[in-house]
């Protein structure tokens, strides 16, 4: 069945993610005082007494990071709109080290004024002079790794900080007038009770952050938790309990005025994380540092996950003139990536990219695959075709909140499976 009007002219160039040049940069700062028991991120443990001002390892890493930035080709004239420092624990950087990195980014790509510059921080790793220095350099958004408000749960997770450190950290951020503060919480922790979870939500709301991120604990195989805990077995809460925790977070946070704009994220008006929206809209971005991923010029690349291998990679990258040695992501994979991240958003995603790559056959298979989820009320179609439930390129898919979000993995997996047998048209 052919598309009508201008829809037949859709082509791979309709994939907006690949038609744009990067306007966001992620910078990985891999250093932590200790490794949390659930952590599978690429990090390097430096102990409790060292930070950027006193660690030669961090200083050496920053030098390598700057070399990578300087060697990376600038792909467009527009300056960066967002910069995100993730980790690890970026708040272990000295003010001078942060300035060194931001100056390199500005020299190479330009940083818009104002840009959203985000930093992940852990309670107990910075003082007022640090946060004031970060603010002078343009940091406008802080994501604070709280995780829980019960000391026994923090200890059971291997966290360095305690609840008192959380309150002190929030007070310091307020004193420094940080425009946007986000608190991270984790549900499904070992020994975590229903009362613990409700209490953590209440305490987080009482601190009035502009943004909250709520994650369910994931047990990764190569972590201490992965070696000692079995999903669904005590002391972990049951799956039914963690589902109830998700629903409870949705009720409490939306009642408190937070907009549930993404599966795990809630924001007050004007405080959505613009950098993370780059990922969820499947748009390109620069990535720098050990283990960092980037998506530029159709290429997805993850850097080495250890300091030694990352240093070797940077030396080869600089010597090679900043050319990424990896194949481009094919259009069909870009579409699947877009489905996976786009449906995380409350606004959902459109289907023009699916139509551009898979044609009408792909839309028809998705239509059959998604019908049960629509009937169950987990999925909503905006701007469907003339026939009920008909998918056309201008249709938008949205998961309902909270039930559709809870079933997102199943819905997305079925969409992937439905498109697998279809030969892409490009």
Image (spheres, grey):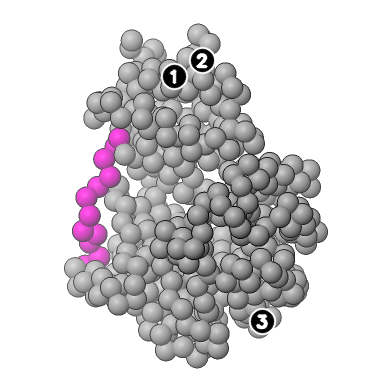
Distance of mark 3 from mark 2, alpha carbons? Answer: 55 Å
Dividing the picture into quarters, in which one does residue 2 lie?
Answer: top left
* Residue occupying image coordinates x 57% and y 71%: 158
Q: Give the range drawn in magenta.
A: 321-332
Q: Residue 127, labelled with which disc?
A: 3
Q: If you read the primary sequence from the N terminus, does the residue marked by circle 1 or circle 3 appear first? A: 3
Residue 188, above or below 341: below
For marks 1 and 3, give the one nearer the viewer: 1
Locate the N terminus by quadrant: top left
Asked whether residue 329 appears in the rendered view, the answer is: yes
Residue 268 % position (x, y): 71, 49
Asked whether residue 140 appears in the rendered view, the answer is: no
Label 2 packing within 10 angstroms: few (<14), some (14-19), many (20+): some
Q: Residue 389, labelled with which disc?
A: 2
Please name the residue that numbered disc 1 is placed on: 367
Query: In this image, 419 relative to 324: left or right?
Result: right
Residue 190 % position (x, y): 61, 59
């Amino acid at each position: 069945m052919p598309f009508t009007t201008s829809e037949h002219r859709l082509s791979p160039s309709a994939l907006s993610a690949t038609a744009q040049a990067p306007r966001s940069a992620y910078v990985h700062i891999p250093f932590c005082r200790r490794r949390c028991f659930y952590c599978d991120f690429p990090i390097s443990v430096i102990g409790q007494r060292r930070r950027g001002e006193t660690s030669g390892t961090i200083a050496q890493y920053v030098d390598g990071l700057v070399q990578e930035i300087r060697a990376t080709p600038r792909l467009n004239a527009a300056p960066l709109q967002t910069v995100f420092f993730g980790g690890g624990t970026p708040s272990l950087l000295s003010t001078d080290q942060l300035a060194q990195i931001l100056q390199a980014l500005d020299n190479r790509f330009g940083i818009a004024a104002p840009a959203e510059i985000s930093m992940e921080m852990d309670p107990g790793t910075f003082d007022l002079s640090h946060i004031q220095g970060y603010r002078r350099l343009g940091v406008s958004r802080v994501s604070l790794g709280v995780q829980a408000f019960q000391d026994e749960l923090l200890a059971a997770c291997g966290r360095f900080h305690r609840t008192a450190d959380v309150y002190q950290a929030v007070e310091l951020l307020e004193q420094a007038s940080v425009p946007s503060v986000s608190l991270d919480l984790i549900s499904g922790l070992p020994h975590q009770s229903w009362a613990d979870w409700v209490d953590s939500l209440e305490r987080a709301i009482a601190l009035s952050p502009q943004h909250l991120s709520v994650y369910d604990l994931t047990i990764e195989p190569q972590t201490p938790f992965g070696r000692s805990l079995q999903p669904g077995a005590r002391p972990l809460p049951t799956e039914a309990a963690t589902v109830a925790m998700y629903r409870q977070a949705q009720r409490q946070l939306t009642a408190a005025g937070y907009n549930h704009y993404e599966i795990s994220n809630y924001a007050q008006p004007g405080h959505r994380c613009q950098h993370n929206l780059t990922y969820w809209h499947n748009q390109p971005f620069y990535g720098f540092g050990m283990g960092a991923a980037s998506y530029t010029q159709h290429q997805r690349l993850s850097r080495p996950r250890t300091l030694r291998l990352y240093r070797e990679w940077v030396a080869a990258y600089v010597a090679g003139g900043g050319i990424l040695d990896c194949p481009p992501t094919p259009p069909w994979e870009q579409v699947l990536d877009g489905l996976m991240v786009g449906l995380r958003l409350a606004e959902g995603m459109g289907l023009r990219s699916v139509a551009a790559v898979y044609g009408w056959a792909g839309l028809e298979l998705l239509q059959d695959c998604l019908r049960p989820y629509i009937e169950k009320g987990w999925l909503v179609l905006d701007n469907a075709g003339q026939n009920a439930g008909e998918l056309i390129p201008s249709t938008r898919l949205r998961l309902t909140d909270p039930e559709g979000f809870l079933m997102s993995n199943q819905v997305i997996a079925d969409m992937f499976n439905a498109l697998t047998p279809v030969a892409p048209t490009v």
